[in-house]
Image (spheres, helix red, strand yellow):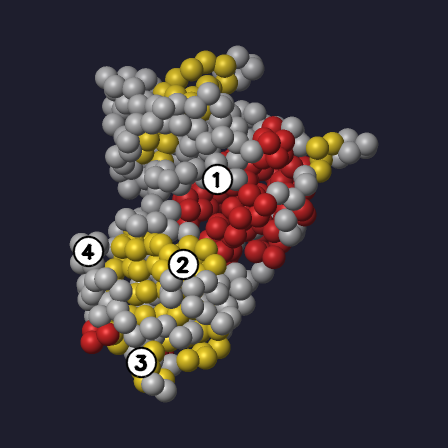
Amino acid sequence: SSESSTTSNAESSTTSSSESSTTSNAESSTTSSSESSTISSTESSTTSSSTSEITSSKVTKPNHIESSKKEAPKTEGQTKTFSTPQQIESTESFQSQPILSGNEEIHFDKNESVENFIMKIGESARKIGQKYDLYASVMIAQAILESASGQSQLAQAPNYNLFGIKGTYNGNFVIMVTNEDLGNGTLYTTQSKFRVYENYEESFEDYAKLLTKGISGNKDFYAGALKANSKTYREATKFLTGRYATDTQYYLKLNELIKTYDLTNYDKEVKGPQMSKTGYQVPIHNYSITSLFGNRGNEFHRGLDMAATQGEPIHAVKAGKVVKAEFHYSWGNYVVIQHEDGSTALYAHQQQYLVKTGDNVLQGQIIGYVGSTGNSTGPHLHLEICKDSSLSQSMLVDPKTLLFGD
């Protein structure tokens, strides 16, 4: 790229410590309405939408999993209402009323919003699937159903709970009013705590721990979902039906989503992240270096250019806090992350970024996708590393030295 050597406005930002991602026990019981109703994260109140929130298949779940219907969050002594996103018609169709063919087989038409959601969560699911011996394809399909493709209140920021797991996570939770099933089809209203995560990857990891560790009194409750205990993803989805969800067609819906969106691609293993001796992770798995840091003809090139396929995931080189996520005439869609030591990394020309200012990110977390926005002649990542938050040319360092040690 031909980034200008002129430095953008320097902003100073507060350094954030990398947050712990230690997971609490995977199961927790339903909370009574008399429990404390403090919401862990601070949200501003908005007007509640009249649109009811779509949930997964209208099924009964074990009580550590979110019930089939949920309403706006509440706090003790004060009611907070949050607007529910307007659900697009196609999403509502596949969520609650899948298309049936003449022979009564379930069928889903491809949907752009679902594809965008898969793009956001796919690599995180692949990573967690490899780590815990689970089918990423199944987890992604479940996330689509359980969270209305990320549009449910619980799945959106600041909650990021894709699977409706109850309880607390690192002390964080949100209270929501839910409709529970007595077991005979009779619904009653109650308040429950639901776990709150920093990002989607934490949600996947916590869910994976639930599947691998089981529930209280039965550690093998979900054992059949593991690759070691199932020959194909179809065996895994069949096993989950009646355990994770009582919907008798649950496995059919998951299988069709996996087929429609080619989710088995995420079951394929990829090489682990390339790490440097200095503790930096290489941000892209498949790339070629096309332009180095330093003088380039009559101009100074501020960073390292890594050419890659459009849509290739971009991973954070270190953990930190997002201080910029916006569009710049030269950098295009770009993100700046400040690390614990005060240094910053800038990721430019993204097709799409997945984080926002104020987010805490983990090392290796997907923050966006390679693109060619701004002053760019082709899809690539322009990476800058700065010793502080100024982004001034005098404080820039050669990313290649930090990433590869040469």
Find the distance from the CA under tag 2 to the CA under tag 4.
20 Å
Type of amino acid under label 4: Ser
Residue 13: assigned label: 4
In the image: residue 134, left or right of residue 403:
right
- Residue drawn at 28 percent across, 41 percent down: 170
Of mark 1 and mark 4, the one earlier in the sequence is 4
In the image: residue 210, left or right of residue 109:
left
In the image: residue 123, left or right of residue 197:
right
Q: Nearer the viewer, mark 4 or mark 3?
A: 3
Find the distance from the CA under tag 3 to the CA under tag 1.
42 Å
Q: Are discs 2 and 4 less than 8 Å apart at CB?
A: no
Of mark 2 and mark 4, the one earlier in the sequence is 4
Q: Is residue 177 above or below residue 3?
A: above
Of mark 1 and mark 2, the one earlier in the sequence is 1
- Rendering coords of residue 153 (x, y %): 42, 32
Viewer-side residue, 163 vs 348: 348
Q: Are discs 3 and 2 less than 8 Å apart at CB?
A: no
Find the distance from the CA under tag 4 to the CA under tag 3.
26 Å
Task: Identify residue for label 2.
Answer: 333
Of mark 4 and mark 3, the one earlier in the sequence is 4
- The N terminus is located in which quarter? bottom left
Disc 1 is placed on an element classified as loop
Task: Identify residue for label 1.
Answer: 150
In the image: residue 49, left or right of residue 140:
left
Task: Identify residue for label 3.
Answer: 300
Q: Is residue 44 something one can see in this rendering?
A: yes
Q: Is residue 241 something one can see in this rendering?
A: no
Q: Are discs 3 and 1 less than 8 Å apart at CB?
A: no
